[in-house]
Amino acid sequence: MVNDCPLCNPVDERVIWRGKLVRVIDASDDDLPGFVRVIVKRHAAEMVDLTAEESAMVRKAVRLCELCMLETMHPDKINLASLGNMVPHVHWHVIARYKDDAFFPDSIWSPRRRTCPEEVLEERRAKAKIMLEKLPSLLTSLEKICPE
Ligand SMILES: [Zn+2]
């Protein structure tokens, strides 16, 4: 049987770290610098489909992304979202939000409210780059502390 799952066979993903259970990708776009996604590599539609240990590992990975994002990007808010309505892979969106971003205070999947000034976005892209450079070693140390 051909597996045509888009998360098992991703196209053009910007992977920043691969672990045994999850991979973390850079999901930022022009409007939203500072957006990472923690994706469970195997099929599990719900968090409760994971073992308790796996669930804890996913939550720790998300928490690390949050901490790193807070420290490097100083967002006004971090949005965490897990929808997964299209694919049977638990995944978490970790999104730096600012009061002047294109969608604030709505979700990033809402209609655009404004255009954030390009110079502000450039500054945030530079901070996001630093975050993406720091994250892999943090995630690797996490996996050493709590193996699957
Ligand atoms: Zn899949």
Image (cartoon, rainbow, N blue to C red):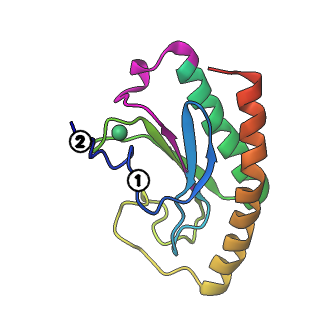
Residue at left 45%, top 20%?
A: 50
61 or 18, nearer to the observer: 18
Residue segment shown in magenta: 36-53
Image quarter where the N terminus lies is: top left
Where in the figure is residue 64, as x and y percent of width and height? 70, 39
Image quarter where the C terminus lies is: top right
SS class, disc 1: loop
Q: Is residue 95 left or right of residue 146?
A: left
> Extreme left residue here?
1
Image quadrant in which you'd find residue 26: bottom right
Whether ligand 1 has any atom under 8 Å from the Cβ at mark 1 is answered as no
Question: Tag on residue 10?
Answer: 1
| Figure check: 99 above or below 62 | below
Q: Could you tell which of marks 2 and 1 lies nearer the N-terminus?
A: 2
Where in the figure is residue 19, as x and y percent of width and height? 62, 36
> Extreme bottom residue here?
118
Label 2 neighbourhood size at 10 Å, few (<14), some (14-19), many (20+)? few
Label 1 neighbourhood size at 10 Å, few (<14), some (14-19), many (20+)? few
Where in the figure is residue 131, as x and y percent of width and height? 73, 57
Question: Tag on residue 60?
Answer: none
Task: Give how far apart the Cα atoms at labels 2 and 1 are.
Answer: 14 Å
Ligand 1 quadrant in view:
top left
Residue to which mark 2 is pinned = 2
